[in-house]
Amino acid sequence: MTGMSASTTSTSDSFDALVIRESDADDGGRTVGIERLTDADLPDGDVTVGIEYSSLNYKDGMALTGTGRIIRTFPMVPGVDLVGTVIASDSERFEVGDSVISTGWGAGERFWGGYSQRQRVRSDWLVARPDGLSSRQAMAIGTAGLTAMLCVMGLEDGGVEPGDGPIIVTGAAGGVGSVAVALLSNLGYEVTAVTGRPEQHEYLRALGASNLLSRSEMSEAPRPLESETWAGAVDTVGSTMLAKVLAQTKYGGVVAACGLAGGTDLPTTVMPFILRGVRLQGVESVITPLDIRTAAWARLATDLPLALLETMTEVVPMSELLDRGPAILAGQVRGRVVVDPNA
Ligand code: NDP
């Protein structure tokens, strides 16, 4: 549906988008390529956005590679995140020229997402880009950074304060992990970073980690309780590493669990919960209500040092996504990848 818009700006009718199609052959195969689309191809929605940047998240890697049946409907324009300028709006909340961000809400899974020069979306997905963050910085943050902020807010809600002891961040050199290390250290927490990549130790120290642990030592099966070490945790890995973190969390500590990079299982016991009052705080960013995500973006604009954000960011053209999708699933991406659909 193109529809008449309450406010529009004139733009060329055609644009580039990365499209994943199911191939005609009956082999479950897919084709992935950059195609020239028109506004008539776009889905329903009350706001059309001229996209400036998108980003690469773990889930985008799954969509690009066909892992885990992330994509529910074809053809699909993937891309969980987008930032851009409103070019047509039937919404009372947004006008032409407004700068807006969308993250999550099933974009790139059930709805068309940000790997395009233009997209039509629902206004209730959108937050205004906060003052103090450029479009590029907003996508350097993206879903991964928003999730890191929600994890930090989860620790704060649980009463964890900088003086309480160290915070452990797992999968630290990845997107969520990198933003979490930078945020926590800037807020005055002592941060221990867990990484499987020793070559990223300098990078993690520069983001603010004061201690480093190897992935292998944190992947050993834990005893039900181990020495009380962490006041809190941001876990992006799950599985045995999350169980290890729980077994080492101090009395009353909070573990914010958001990821599954190491697996979806959780081989733990109830001991950390019933003997130490440890709190396991689940964190999800996809359907987080608008008031919480607006608050999280405002916090990101003030609490994340932008010079550090720059050191964790690389910008790539949309055409590079076919290489980067498998790389993020293989744990080979450092920090955040911003996608420029106009390059
Ligand atoms: P990245 O790939 O950028 O980061 C994941 C990191 O985990 C890797 O860089 C690596 O860090 C580590 N890792 C990878 N494989 C393994 C493994 N087998 N065992 C242990 N550690 C491993 O992804 P993101 O930061 O974008 O996302 C991280 C996780 O959070 C993903 O599982 C993702 O699905 C989830 N997520 C959840 C969200 C939510 O709403 N709950 C939102 C966003 C992400 P290192 O090299 O330092 O060891």
Image (spheres, rainbow, N blue to C red):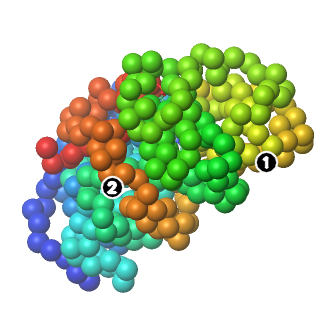
Q: Which residue is mark 1?
A: 252
Figure label count: 2
Q: In the picture provided, is 52 more to the left or to the right than 81?
A: left
Residue 44 visible in the current orientation: no
Please state which amino acid type lies under the numbered disc 1.
Gly
Assess mark 1: CB under 8 A from ligand 1? no
Q: In the picture provided, is 136 more to the left or to the right than 273?
A: left
Q: Residue at x 30, y 39 (%)?
A: 311
* Disc 2 secondary structure class: helix
Measured from the top left, where is residue 134 in percent x and y?
Answer: 26, 59
Q: Nearer the viewer, residue 319 or 29?
A: 319
Quarter holding the C terminus is top left
Assess mark 2: CB under 8 A from ligand 1? no
Answer whether labels 1 and 2 touch (C-beta < 8 Å).
no
Q: Is residue 268 above or below residue 10?
A: above
Q: In the picture provided, is 68 more to the left or to the right than 179?
A: right
Residue 201 visible in the current orientation: yes
Q: Residue furthest front?
A: 163
Q: Which residue is mark 2?
A: 138
Q: Residue at x 40, y 68 (%)?
A: 127
Measured from the top left, where is residue 26 in percent x and y?
Answer: 41, 26
What crowding class fits label 2: few (fewer than 14 Cα within 10 Å), some (14-19), or many (20 or more)?
many
Q: Nearer the viewer, residue 4 or 212?
A: 212
Q: Is residue 205 above or below residue 187?
A: above
Quarter holding the N terminus is bottom left
Please state which amino acid type lies under the numbered disc 2.
Ala
Measured from the top left, where is residue 290 in percent x and y?
Answer: 51, 68
Name which quarter of the figure residue 89 lies in: bottom left
- Whichever of callouts 1 and 2 sits on the residue coming sooner in the sequence is 2
Mark 1 or 2: in front is 1
The residues bearing labels 1 and 2 have C-alpha atoms spaced at a distance of 34 Å
